[in-house]
Image: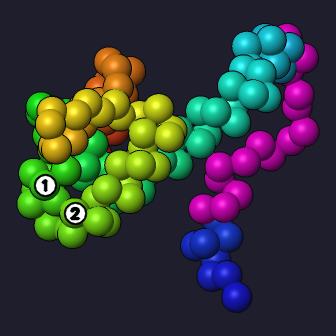
Amino acid sequence: MRTDSQQGRMQEDVCEVNCVHPEAVAQARATLPGGRDVDTASAFLKLVGDPTRLKILSALNTRELCVCDLAAVVNLSESAVSHQLRLLRDGRVVAFRRAGRVAYYRLLDHHVTMLIEGALEHARE
């Protein structure tokens, strides 16, 4: 059961009258991304939204790291980190290179860097 204060908070953030603004609606609809772009962006945000993966990405935001280093940084097994990196690589969030028997990972591009930095900055505010 809702208390009076909960009911009041729910009502203060909705319109008290039905008032659609056709020009505003048309303008907003015209700028909506296509369905495929929405699906791709949503999948990307789900990937980076996982706490473990966000820690991995934050570590990679400092520099390229190998799987062993990442496991030590986030305090997980190499197997667990490798699994997360595979998901991130399949989602085009990270890239890797081999140097002999060592696999190094880095953030794929500046878009990922900006997203990670922006999300963490927002969390700190």
Q: Who is closer to the viewer here, 99 or 44?
A: 99
Does 118 lie within the magenta span? no
Q: Report the side of 120 relative to 112 (left or right).
A: left
Does 10 lie within the magenta span? yes
Q: Amino acid at mark 2?
A: Glu
Location of residue 11 (image quadrant)? bottom right
Residue labelled with disc 1 = 68
Quarter of the image with the C terminus is top left
Q: Report the side of 83 relative to 6 (left or right).
A: left
| Image location (x, y in percent) of residue 112 | 36, 28
Callout 2: few (<14), some (14-19), or many (20+) C-alpha neighbours within 10 Å?
A: some
Location of residue 17 (image quadrant)? top right
Quarter of the image with the N terminus is bottom right
What numbered label is drawn on residue 49?
A: none
Q: Residue at x 88, y 31 (%)?
A: 19
Q: Residue at x 77, y 43 (%)?
A: 15
Q: Who is closer to the viewer here, 93 or 5?
A: 93
Residue labelled with disc 2 = 78
Q: Who is closer to the viewer here, 103 or 1?
A: 103
Callout 1: few (<14), some (14-19), or many (20+) C-alpha neighbours within 10 Å?
A: some
| Image location (x, y in percent) of residue 122 | 30, 39
Q: Are marks 1 and 2 in contact (CB under 8 Å)?
A: yes
